[in-house]
Amino acid sequence: MSISLLGIFLLLYEMYRVAKEYARSSQLDRENQLLAVESRRYMELRSYLEQTRHLRHDFRQHLHVISGLTEAGRLDELKSYLSQYESELSDARPTLCVNAAVDALAGHYDYEARKQGIQIEWKLELPKLLPLPEADLCTILGNLLENALHASQKLPPEERQVKVLARMLSPAMMGLMVENRYDGVLKKQGGVLHSTKHDGQGIGLVSVETAVHRYHGNLTVETGGNVFRANVLLNL
């Protein structure tokens, strides 16, 4: 009897150890996926900021040319140069947010949306200096925007629409909203949204939830009328 009980105990212990190791392995896999997503988001932001730096450099060169032509009194050449420069600037995007990091991120997704025929409306009423690390806010906003653009691609071009709102609700509270139309198809399991790109819960939303909980905030999702709306509240 004692040997039988010992055998059962050892078997249960081994099952417990295997289950614990599996849970740990699954957690590590999820953390690695999240790190990969954030690394890609960081590289996208770095790339866009680098492009902005080059634009500032090029603008200084244009100012040198304009200054030289003005001082030399070569007005006809100056008018021709300004006309050419104005046509180049017609494709330049407007500033979407006074905060440089959020503006760079928004500029990236605004460009991607236009390439995909997605109408996107921005309302980023944020201060130049944020009351939280820019990387955290860009993680939240970037993941929500990526999901919104992905869902929009499944719709006919005339139905592709995204709305983005971010503003300070008080000095210690920030609100975000990303809304997009979608095809009405959602994958849920146990009330939890799952990715339509792959099996399991979407990495993007997991990353958003992780960042939101860091600020004791709240993420709510509303669906209805083929509209998907993600609302984020951050306590700063």
Image (spheres, rainbow, N blue to C red):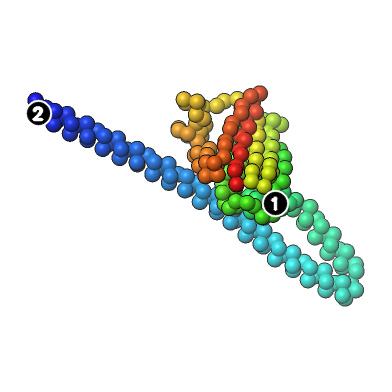
Q: Give the numbered dot on residue 18.
A: none
The image quadrant where one finds the N terminus is top left
The amino acid type found where label 2 is placed reads Ser
Q: Is residue 118 at all visible to an observer of this figure?
A: no
x and y percentages locating residue 16 in the rendered image = 26, 34
For the residue labelled by badge 1, is the local secondary structure a helix, a strand or a loop?
Answer: loop
Disc 2: CA contacts within 10 A as few (<14), some (14-19) or many (>=20): few
Q: Label 1: which residue?
A: 127
Tell me which label, 2 or 1, sits earlier in the chain: 2
x and y percentages locating residue 182 in the rendered image = 62, 29
Q: Marks 2 and 1, how far apart in space?
A: 71 Å
Which numbered disc, 2 or 1, marks the residue closer to the eye? 2
- Looking at the picture, does residue 168 appear above or below residue 75? above
Q: Label 2: which residue?
A: 2
Q: 179 or 20: nearer the eye? A: 20
Q: Residue at x 67, y 47 (%)?
A: 171
Q: Residue at x 63, y 57 (%)?
A: 49
